[in-house]
Image: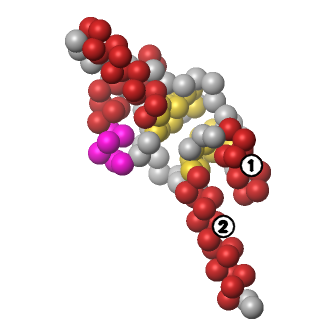
Amino acid sequence: MVSKLITFTPDTLIGFAINSLIINKISGAPVIDRNGNLVGILSEKDCLQTLLESSYYNYLSGHVKDYMSKNLTTIDINDNITEVAQKFIDLRFRRFPVLENGKLVGQISRRDVLKVIETISKLQSSSK
């Protein structure tokens, strides 16, 4: 899990958010309100919608709140790695926000789970 996250607010300009995703080489980021509550996720897929609208208006405009996904699936900090892996298989998301007592504490990706699998595999190999 990554705990140092790039986040956006609903009022972040979409152009700034897209630029941040590109510069930081990430495929999405949590969206939080003024109180730090998770209110959405902005993914590369969400940002693709801006192409359609900007070609119609001939101008890239709008805010993160206009494009973010609001129907969220999250992971609880106490979920075990098997449960997390199963969610990735079942739901086909690339990342999940991680909550502790309802507050955003990090984000876990498919790659994070793969790293755990690799570590387990190495430990099993070395114990033989």
Residue 10 seen in render: no
Quadrant of residue 93 within the rendered picture = top right
Please state which of residues 42 and 92 is positioned toward the viewer in this rendering: 92
Q: Position of residue 56 (x, y in %)?
A: 29, 9
What residue do we see at 64% from left, 80% from top?
A: 122
Q: Along the line of sight, which residue is nearer the eye, 13 or 85?
A: 85
For mark 2, what is the residue? 117
Identify whether 117 is placed above or below 35.
below
In the image, taking residue 116 as reference, residue 22 lies left or right, namely: left
- Judged by its main secondary structure, the magenta piece is helix
Q: Is residue 24 magenta?
A: yes
The image position of residue 83, as x and y in percent, is 77, 51
Find the magenta span and give its range: 20-25
How far separated are the C-alphas under marks 2 and 1?
Answer: 13 Å
Query: Is any part of residue 121 visible from this angle?
Result: yes
The reply, left or right, for residue 45 in relation to residue 121 is left
Q: Check disc 1 and report the residue beneath it.
A: 86
Residue 72 placement (x, y as % from top left): 63, 30
Q: Estimate how packed mark 1 is, as few (under 14), some (14 to 19) or many (20 or more) residues with alpha carbons within 10 Å.
A: few
